[in-house]
Amino acid sequence: MALGDKVGLMVTVGVIGGVGINAAHELGHKHERFEQRLSKIALAQTCYGHFFVEHNRGHHSRVATPADPASARLGENLYCFIPRSLLGGLRSALRSEARRLARAGLSQRTFGNHVLNAWLLSALLFTVVALWFGPIVLPWLLGQAVIGFCLLEIVNYIEHYGLRRQRLPSGRYEKVAPRHSWNSNTVVANVFLFHLQRHSDHHANPRRRYQTLRSFDDAPELPGGYGTMLVLALVPPLWRRVMDPLVLDHYGGEIGLAAVDSSRERRGVARYGQRNG
């Protein structure tokens, strides 16, 4: 097989793996143990088993706050966001599972560790494939895994860019609402992505099955489907030209309400909005 064919196959399999993470995302939200096991199996291809823990216990509770590594800040470059989300999500999943096992009086080195047993599934899958086709396939397997989980992180970037829950007088953050996630209602993507684009309702009601997710008038709307927005996100100047004004409009021009974490970033985004508004 020619090098170009190998690269093309790797990318194709990686994209399928990214869509598989979306299926795992839907299954992982369910209470039924069988569906949760299917979620881990779907995550094995991309070596992203810790997503099962972090997404449900971490991301959904901390979404649109500074504590959530998977919520992109206003003005944040995609290529800075991806490593921040990758490492932050991994650390959060390991800490969360360690706390759960400690409360149960169990060691982290147990098959009951959701992160560990999910990674073992990946190791088993890669070992079987390498034994079948030879070790030469391992770099390509790793490549498709990277493509798959990076595709997920790009979607994370799109879904919450610049949005922030406000802190209440009690010190806690306001309840998650549709206005804290970007929404889209393009028909084709909703069919192929299990209505993932109706992300506002998903975060407001995470146990709702994808077939019944709704659209809300107060949810911020992306100017295009996920395919279009993914291409824009890969080119940061184009992404900011399109999205930064939408974020500022969503907050009525009050940049202090958006997800900007430092005064330096805030001034930079304000200047950018003035130039491109």
Image (cartoon, rainbow, N blue to C red):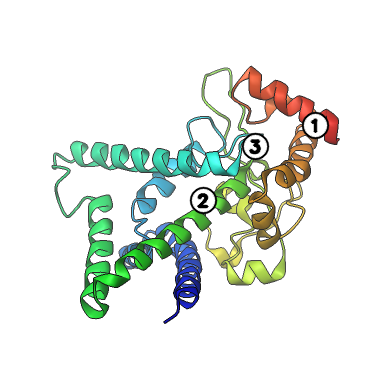
The residue drawn where x is 29% and y is 41% is: 94
Residue 252 visible in the picture? no
For marks 3 and 1 on the same chain, the one whose residue lies earlier in the sequence: 3
Identify which amino acid the numbered label 1 is placed on.
Gly
| Amino acid type of the residue that numbered disc 2 sits on in the rendered structure | Glu
Q: Secondary structure at mark 1?
A: helix
How far across and how far down the image is residue 125, in percent?
Answer: 27, 69
Q: CA distance from mark 3 to mark 1?
A: 16 Å
Q: Which residue is mark 2?
A: 153
Q: Position of residue 220 (x, y in %)?
A: 73, 46
Left or right: where 133 falls relative to 156: left
The quarter of the picture where the N terminus appears is: bottom left
Numbered disc in front, either 3 or 2: 2
Q: Which numbered marker is on residue 273?
A: 1
Q: Give the left or right position of residue 94, taking residue 165 as reference.
A: left
Label 3 packing within 10 angstroms: few (<14), some (14-19), many (20+): many
